[in-house]
Amino acid sequence: MPTPEFRKQYLMNFKHVHRIAALSVALACANASALQSGEDVPFITSPDNVTLEMLSAARVGPKDHVLDLGSGDGRIVITAAKRFGASGMGVEIVPDLVERSNRSAKDAGVADRVSFRVQDLFKTDLAQATVITMYLLQEVNLQLRPAILGLKPGTRVVSHDWDMGDWAPDRTTVVAVPDKKVGLEKSSKIHLWTVPAKVAGLWCGAGLLRGASLELAQKFQRFEGTLRHRNRARELKGTVEGSTLRSVTEKAGELVLEVSGSQMRLVAAGGPLTLAQGQSFTRAGPEGCR
Ligand SMILES: C[S@@+](CC[C@H](N)C(=O)[O-])C[C@H]1O[C@@H](n2cnc3c(N)ncnc32)[C@H](O)[C@@H]1O
């Protein structure tokens, strides 16, 4: 358990990071201390309006399993169950907070759908979640980023205040927090990402699309590439939202594709590809498209 003096020092570091965004210096101090206690971020709660906005932004519903990394007093997971009908789990390194969270879950009548455990967030299996919530630090988010990008396409990730570097959020909302205790701004940012399918590479047309090919480059949720079909090449550019690729360009019009494993189905298309709707591309093997 961290001593009260240690926690005070830690909190000061967190405030400092918020105040001047001097991440490197503050985190160097915070991380050095964190090694002693296991905490990577101090306990500060997301206010209720921020919690509600985080869960709304991720469109949490009864089919979702919400995982809060560093769950503090458990409020995000408990609210996800009570207000949005989801199930969930919180992992938290401070045992007292886990005890408190489990008590609150019972009091809120959601103990059958949520659980809290003393666990290091870096040792947590993220694949169980359909929605991940975090109020950590940018540096911690960045450490988690490779694992998050490897999750099932469509998994939503919401972060209070901190972003993930050059993986830009799909959406950011700002919520007023008049009595905010950290930072200078009296507001909180809520960033939302949807894990994109991995689509880079060469795809070969099948059925009515036989002879066509799709060559794609991808950076996070953005892609661009070329569709070759009947001796014509069309440039594509758009976004990958979960398993759905959407390209809208002046020349090629709209194109919507759905990825499932090594298949990509043409869901909507304008121009000459209209007839090929419902047809698929498959990921090329080492010999390319034949
Ligand atoms: C800023 S608080 C956020 C609490 C809660 N998620 C919320 O938004 O109200 C961050 C929490 O992460 C916990 N924490 C820090 N490092 C952790 C780690 N490595 N594993 C699990 N929890 C951690 C802290 O103890 C703290 O309760």
Image (cartoon, rainbow, N blue to C red):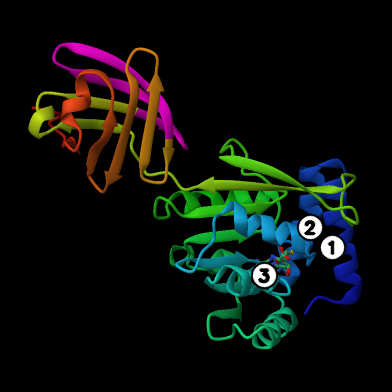
Helix, strand or loop status at disc 3: loop
Can you tell which quarter of the image residue 100 is in? bottom right
Give the CA distance from mark 1 to mark 2: 6 Å
Q: Amino acid at mark 3?
A: Ser
Give the CA distance from mark 3 to mark 2: 19 Å
For mark 2, what is the residue? 30
| Quadrant in which ligand 1 is drawn | bottom right
Q: Amino acid at mark 1?
A: Tyr
Sequence-wise, the earlier of marks 3 and 2 is 2
Q: Please tell me whether residue 220 belongs to the stretch shown in magenta.
A: yes
Q: Amino acid at mark 2?
A: Ala
For mark 1, what is the residue? 10
Q: Is residue 258 above or below residue 246?
A: below
Residue at 36 percent across and 36 percent down: it is 245
Quadrant in which the N terminus is drawn:
bottom right
Q: Is residue 135 left or right of residue 237?
A: right
Sequence-wise, the earlier of marks 3 and 1 is 1
| Image coords of residue 276 (percent x, y) | 16, 29
For mark 3, what is the residue? 71
Helix, strand or loop status at disc 1: helix
Quadrant in which the C terminus is drawn:
top left
Dot 3, crowdedness within 10 Å: few (<14), some or many (≥20)? many
Sequence-wise, the earlier of marks 1 and 2 is 1
For the record, the magenta segment spans: 217-239
- Does mark 3 have its CB less than 8 Å from ligand 1? yes
Q: Are marks 3 and 2 in contact (CB under 8 Å)?
A: no
